Image (cartoon, rainbow, N blue to C red):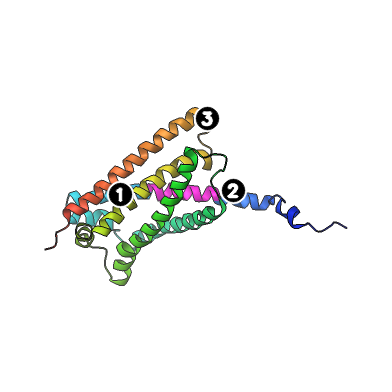
């Protein structure tokens, strides 16, 4: 009769193939949903915010107009469902993974900043989705008004700071996520030269997102009517 495993022996039992396969699939799906459609949609959404430089009507059309209820439901399916999936997967991964003890260099710094940006981004997106989407559409019965968000950013300092830091978190999280997606996530770029090239692409992507996002925040700030 086989002896029961002791506590020490049980601790070193390797994970079952089914568990490995499940974690592998979840990791790939979590990485994929972060890149597409979430990453693509976020870039397009930030770009549409630049309509604030044209007029309130142009912004309202670009950002809030879905054309039909079907368009609203499509946005829900394409964006919110993957967002919830990625969020749940990311939270689980944060509890399971730890920075490499043997590596105290740039990789660990990037790991920690990515985790901090994820926490900040989760708080920012939760507040943003509630105030800019759920509350006006489902509690007040209308899309968010341009004058409301522009006035809030112009006249409420904490809101301005939150949006500036939120854009910073978005830019870093997506840029680092792009690097992880193509390297560790899906192994598309594996050679030393490809990894070096991807570092440059990720930095460029970060800067592009940051410029577009901060330009959008400034456009809303400039368009807001000052109080008093």
Give how far across and how far down residue 76 sits, in percent.
39, 60
**Horizontally, is 33 left or right of 53 in the view?**
right
Is residue 208 depicted above or below 80 in this figure?
above
Q: From this viewpoint, which residue is outermost toward the right?
A: 1
Camera-side residue of 82 and 215: 215
Tell me the quarter of the picture where residue 207 sits.
Answer: top left
Q: Residues within 10 Å of mark 3 (few under 14, many from 20)?
A: few
Q: Which residue is mark 2?
A: 24
Earlier residue among tags 1 and 3: 1
Give how far across and how far down residue 161 sits, in percent.
28, 54
Please identify the dominant SS of the magenta region: helix
Q: Which residue is mark 3?
A: 191
Q: From this viewpoint, which residue is outermost toward the top?
A: 193
Segment tinted magenta in the rendering: 27-40
Q: Which residue is mark 1?
A: 46
For the point 53% across and 33% down, the residue is 190
For the point 36% across and 39% down, the residue is 205
Asked if residue 31 shows in the view, the reply is yes
Helix, strand or loop at mark 3 = loop
């Amino acid at each position: 009769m086989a002896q029961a495993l002791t506590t020490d022996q049980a601790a070193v039992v390797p994970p079952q193939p089914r568990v490995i396969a499940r974690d592998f699939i979840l990791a790939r799906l979590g990485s994929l949903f972060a890149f597409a459609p979430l990453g693509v949609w976020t870039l397009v959404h930030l770009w549409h915010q630049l309509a604030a430089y044209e007029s309130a009507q142009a912004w309202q059309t670009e950002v809030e107009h879905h054309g039909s209820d079907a368009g609203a439901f499509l946005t829900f399916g394409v964006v919110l469902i993957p967002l919830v999936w990625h969020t749940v997967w990311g939270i689980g991964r944060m509890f399971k993974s730890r920075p490499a003890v043997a590596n105290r260099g740039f990789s660990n710094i990037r790991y920690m900043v990515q985790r901090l940006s994820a926490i900040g981004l989760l708080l920012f997106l939760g507040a943003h989705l509630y105030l800019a989407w759920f509350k006006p559409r489902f509690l007040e019965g209308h899309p968010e008004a341009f004058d409301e968000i522009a006035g809030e950013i112009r006249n409420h300092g904490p809101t301005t700071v939150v949006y500036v830091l939120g854009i910073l978190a978005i830019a870093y999280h997506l840029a680092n996520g792009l690097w992880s997606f193509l390297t560790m996530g899906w192994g598309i770029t594996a050679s030393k030269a490809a990894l070096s090239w991807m570092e440059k692409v990720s930095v460029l992507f970060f800067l592009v997102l940051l410029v577009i996002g901060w330009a959008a925040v400034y456009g809303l700030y400039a368009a807001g009517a000052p109080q008093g």
